[in-house]
């Protein structure tokens, strides 16, 4: 396997599957099966889960919510998704643990990077909920922060498209895919692969990012095996 320890970012939206809202149990099962397969091969997996399928602070603010309260609602949404993931791992006998960036025992244990690393080393999949724990951030930034803290070899961003394109391939049929791209190019072109804060954080700390389509069963395994199916973001 190419990487020993990965940080996998899954968006909340990716959990909603075709139903367009909430949590699709088939989708959960597909993800957890794929993750279990690589965990069994010795890859240490930490997951940062988003909450956009339930609530986003920015959208709330457009409808008159206080931004901080809205972001707190968004962070709680990520905890709901984390518990759903944990339940799905339990169902397939894959050891996993939910760590939260905000104290909320017994729903999840309070995150510390030492605890996360200890769990990863013993083969437990670590589900990181609550993003950074602070408003005005996103789970993309939560992912870059945690990837650095736990010394992940790479941050994998599982999406529903095959990588980074010159434009949104769901809107522009002429868009072409990059196999590799630099952080500066992502920023210069204003590509919406990750939010800017997260991209800059990865750039400054030389954390490689790999963007790939997690909705195709088997793709996670392929990425770990070194197959070039997505886009690698490098210095
Ligand atoms: N959020 C936050 N701080 C964080 C992470 C998330 O305030 O560190 C809030 C923010 O409102 C965000 C929501 O939680 O919109 C859900 O996270 P995100 O939008 O990143 O989820 P995704 O798009 O990955 O589903």
Image: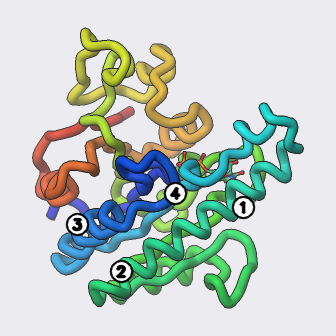
Are the residues at dot 1 and dot 4 in contact (C-beta closer than 8 Å)?
no
Q: Quadrant of the C terminus?
A: top left
Indicate the secondary structure of the residue bearing disc 4.
Answer: loop
Q: Is mark 1 within 8 Å of ligand 1?
A: yes
Mark closer to the chain start, 2 or 3: 3
Number of the front mark, 2 or 4: 4
The residue that appears at 44% across and 72% down in the rendered structure is 85
Mark closer to the chain start, 1 or 3: 3
Q: CA distance from mark 2 to mark 3?
A: 11 Å
Q: Residue 34 has which mark?
A: 3
**Residue nearest the viewer, comparing 215 with 225:** 215
Indicate the secondary structure of the residue bearing disc 2.
Answer: helix
Residue at the top extreme, as displayed: 174
Q: Residue 172 has which mark?
A: none
Number of the front mark, 1 or 3: 3
Mark closer to the chain start, 2 or 1: 2
Question: Residue 127 placed where, x, y %?
Answer: 48, 72
Indicate the secondary structure of the residue bearing disc 3.
Answer: helix
Question: Residue 84 placed where, x, y %?
Answer: 48, 73
Q: CA distance from mark 1 to mark 4?
A: 22 Å
**Residue nearest the viewer, comparing 91 with 182:** 91
Q: Which residue is mark 2?
A: 89
Q: Residue 22 has which mark?
A: 4
The residue that appears at 54% across and 51% down in the rendered structure is 53
Q: Which residue is mark 1?
A: 133
Left or right, residue 41 beside residue 231? left
Q: CA distance from mark 1 to mark 3?
A: 28 Å
């Amino acid at each position: 396997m190419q990487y020993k320890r990965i940080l996998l970012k899954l968006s909340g939206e990716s959990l909603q599957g075709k139903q367009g809202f909430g949590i699709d149990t088939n989708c959960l099962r597909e993800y957890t099966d794929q993750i279990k397969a690589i965990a069994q091969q010795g890859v240490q997996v930490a997951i940062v889960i988003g909450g956009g399928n339930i609530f986003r602070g920015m959208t709330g603010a457009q409808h008159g919510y206080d931004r901080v309260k809205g972001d707190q609602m968004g962070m709680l949404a990520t905890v709901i998704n984390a518990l759903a993931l944990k339940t799905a791992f339990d169902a397939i006998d894959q050891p996993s643990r939910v760590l939260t960036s905000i104290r909320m025992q017994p729903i999840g244990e309070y995150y510390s990077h030492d605890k996360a690393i200890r769990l990863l080393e013993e083969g437990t999949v670590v589900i990181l909920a609550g993003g950074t724990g602070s408003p005005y951030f996103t789970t993309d930034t939560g992912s870059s922060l945690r990837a650095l803290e736990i010394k992940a070899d790479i941050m994998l961003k599982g999406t529903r498209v095959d990588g980074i394109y010159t434009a949104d391939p769901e809107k522009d049929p002429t868009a072409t895919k990059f196999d590799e791209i630099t952080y500066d190019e992502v920023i210069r072109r204003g590509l919406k692969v990750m939010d800017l804060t997260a991209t800059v954080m990865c750039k400054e700390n030389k954390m490689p990012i790999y963007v790939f389509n997690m909705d195709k069963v088997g793709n996670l395994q392929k990425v770990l095996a070194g197959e070039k199916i997505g886009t690698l973001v490098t210095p």
